Amino acid sequence: MKSFQVSYHLTLFEEETIDSKIEQICLEQSVELPRTVIAGDIAENVVGEPVEKNQLSEDVYEVTIRWALMNIGHDITAFLNLLYGNISLKPGIRIDWVEWQQLPENLFKGPSLGIKGLREQYDIYDRPLSSTALKPLGSNPDKLGYLCYHFAKGGIDIIKDDHNLMNQKYAPFRKRVESCVAAVHKAADESGHRARYFTNVTADGPELLKRYRQAAELGADGVLVCPHICGLPGLHELREAELSLPIMAHPSFSGTMVNKNNEGFAPAFLYGQLWRALGADVAIYPNVGGRFSFSLSQCEAINEAARTRTEEWPYQAVFPAPAGGLKLTNIEKWKNAYGPDTVFLMGGSLYEYPDGIEQAAYKFSEILER
């Protein structure tokens, strides 16, 4: 029987035993019936099978369960449901990793460009990339184009829409893209630096793919998407469209999946592995020390999961993009800590710089180019 394995971090609560908790997962994520009424081929080939159990502390275990590939067919939705369907409603279950190389061929395509492809496109090989976000919400296309122009002239590599800019009346999608595309080209003509503009295509249902195609037609250099708002399979749908626009994934709406050590997903699994498998070329995550609560070890684990390519992680390496607290005063520190294969996403620190955003962008760029 062809199969793949999933590693779980299990925490026991009052009156739970590890074997009963494993049994619950094996049944709940497959047949959803008591074992007493399951027999024959279904019991042997459909129900999950525990293959390893290691005790980490008094109430915490690392457990590996084998699942039949026939349970997921060739559907990402079926895979996600098996991965964390009904057990998402139970406490003390966290997903740590998946045996990606055993999954059906082409179930996940991984990124179309990744680190290697983006570096080749941008002709930047020996340093991190700089990025910023166009904000605040309420700005019109002219204002956003103005900001885009000055960030580009200052040397920013990737200028993205803020994740909450979608298709509001004061900043409609088409006009916003047209304004910002014109701005990066104007800045390139004047300064010689070609910044890349990534527009936010997060949208309802079929509108997601429609905006992705519009972004390509209008000359955007890439797209931003919030996969936990428009759906994880939506991220892969963009990847399969094969329009050669790189995809930057944003963590909005994913916090409850990663904020507890004993439930949900390990941050490195979600942002570094799953998004990468689904097709993200750049994975944004909240950096330690900013407005959010990630630890340094969690951030380092995300970086490793995004970049490492082995037999176990067969997809192209992608850029991790720490954000949410980077400042001009500490970017040198993070550059040294995280290394060149990083996209550093800085927002507020550039906007509050006393000499204006163009000079702030220039200083940011100069630090990364040293």
Image (spheres, rainbow, N blue to C red):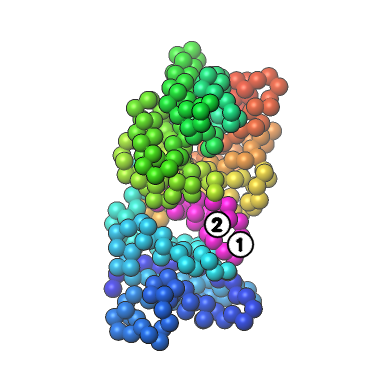
Q: Amino acid at mark 2?
A: Met
**What residue occupies the far front of the structure in this picture?**
169
**Residue located at (44% from left, 66% from top):** 6
Mark 2, Cα crowd under 10 Å, few <14 / some 14-19 / many 20+, is some
Up-down relation of residue 163 to residue 34 (above or below):
above
Is 269 on the left-hand or right-hand side of 361? left
Q: Amino acid at mark 1?
A: Asn
**Residue 227 location in percent, x, y?**
46, 47
| Quarter of image, res 51 | bottom left
Is residue 147 rendered magenta in the image?
no
**Segment tinted magenta in the rendering:** 254-277
**Residue located at (52% from left, 81% from top):** 20
- Determine whether the residue tagged by mark 1 lies in a helix, strand or loop: loop
**Residue 68 location in percent, x, y?**
33, 70
The reply to whether discs 2 and 1 touch (Cβ–Cβ < 8 Å) is no
Up-down relation of residue 212 to residue 230 (above or below):
above
Mark 1 highlights which residue?
A: 261
- Determine whether the residue tagged by mark 2 lies in a helix, strand or loop: helix
Separation of marks 2 and 1 at Cα, in angstroms = 10 Å
Front tag of 2 and 1: 2
**Residue 255 location in percent, x, y?**
58, 52
| Quarter of image, res 74 | bottom left
Q: Nearer the viewer, residue 312 or 250?
A: 250
Is 140 on the left-hand or right-hand side of 312? right
Mark 2 highlights which residue?
A: 257
